[in-house]
Image (cartoon, rainbow, N blue to C red):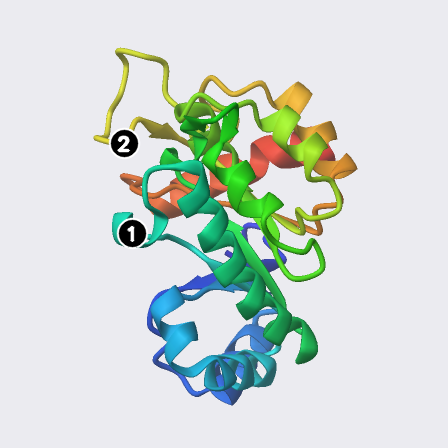
Amino acid sequence: MAAIGYRGVEMFGALELAANDLRALLDRHGLALASAHVGIDSMEKDLDGVIAYHKAAGNNTIVVPWVGPDRRGGDSSSWSAFGRVLDGLGARCADAGMRLLYHNHDFEMVMLDGQAAMEWLLDAADPANLGAEFDLAWVVKGGGDPVALLNKYAGRCARVHAKDLEPAGQTTNRLGLAGVGHGTLDWDAILPAVHAAGAEWLIVEHDEPAEPLVSIQRSFEFLASKLG
């Protein structure tokens, strides 16, 4: 990844290296630890331990990557209630000098009482305690407008996930995802909104690439052509 030109990584899943070893590995390749996806169960069980690990590894941003149906419910009030749970966790992160974000998939775009579930979640939390890591392809796949959401929550979008969607009827994998700039998203409209929203990192992601290194190379080249 470093050879391609990436400047940082976002971690996900079980981290098997000691924090100092992870930091040393990334330092050796000139890569920053931009953020990390951490399951809410792990945070509720031992948030102090999670914070300590990531601070030692050089990371200041924790992202909740997913919430199951049992936690999110099916109406606006349940999403607001979950937002208040995250607000509490985010306040503890903020007290420790860390930042907490929530990452969406498509189901957070369902409309409930006039706005998307993601909006109910974010609106229930103090902006100082909870931000958004908008996954642009999942926003669109769920029927949402990424530019409108980035504009509404400007200042709370420190991290943004960049991937694309294959044209309808031309899918090559079960999720219909594509490398950045090789699908249907309107990047000429989206990228200025990402910048205006205050994103510090634009994180390339593809959930199921056939050839991971080829995929991130193509995405990097496209973004470099747009962003310089």
Three-letter amino acid code at the position of disc 1: Gly
Q: Is mark 1 on a helix, strand or loop?
A: loop
Residue 60 appears anywhere in the view: no
Residue with the mark numbered 1: 68
Q: Distance between the residues labelled 1 and 2?
A: 18 Å
* Image location (x, y in percent) of residue 70: 26, 52
In the image, farthest residue toward the front: 77
In front of the other: 169 or 212: 169
State whether residue 53 is above or below residue 79. Answer: below
Residue neighbourhood size for the residue with mark 1, other residues' Cα within 10 Å, grouped as few (<14), some (14–19), many (≥20): few
Q: Which residue appears at 33% of the width and 54% of the height? A: 71
Residue 92 image label: none
Three-letter amino acid code at the position of disc 2: Leu
* Image location (x, y in percent) of residue 39: 38, 65
In front of the other: 147 or 46: 46
In front of the other: 121 or 169: 121
In the image: residue 217, left or right of residue 128: left
In front of the other: 135 or 108: 108
* Image location (x, y in percent) of residue 106: 38, 33
Residue with the mark numbered 2: 175
Determine which quarter of the picture holds residue 226. Answer: top right
State whether residue 119 is above or below residue 141. Answer: below
Q: Is mark 2 on a helix, strand or loop?
A: loop
Dot 1 or dot 2, earlier in sequence: 1
Q: Which of marks 1 and 2 is in front?
A: 1
Residue 222 appears anywhere in the view: yes
Residue neighbourhood size for the residue with mark 2, other residues' Cα within 10 Å, grouped as few (<14), some (14–19), many (≥20): few
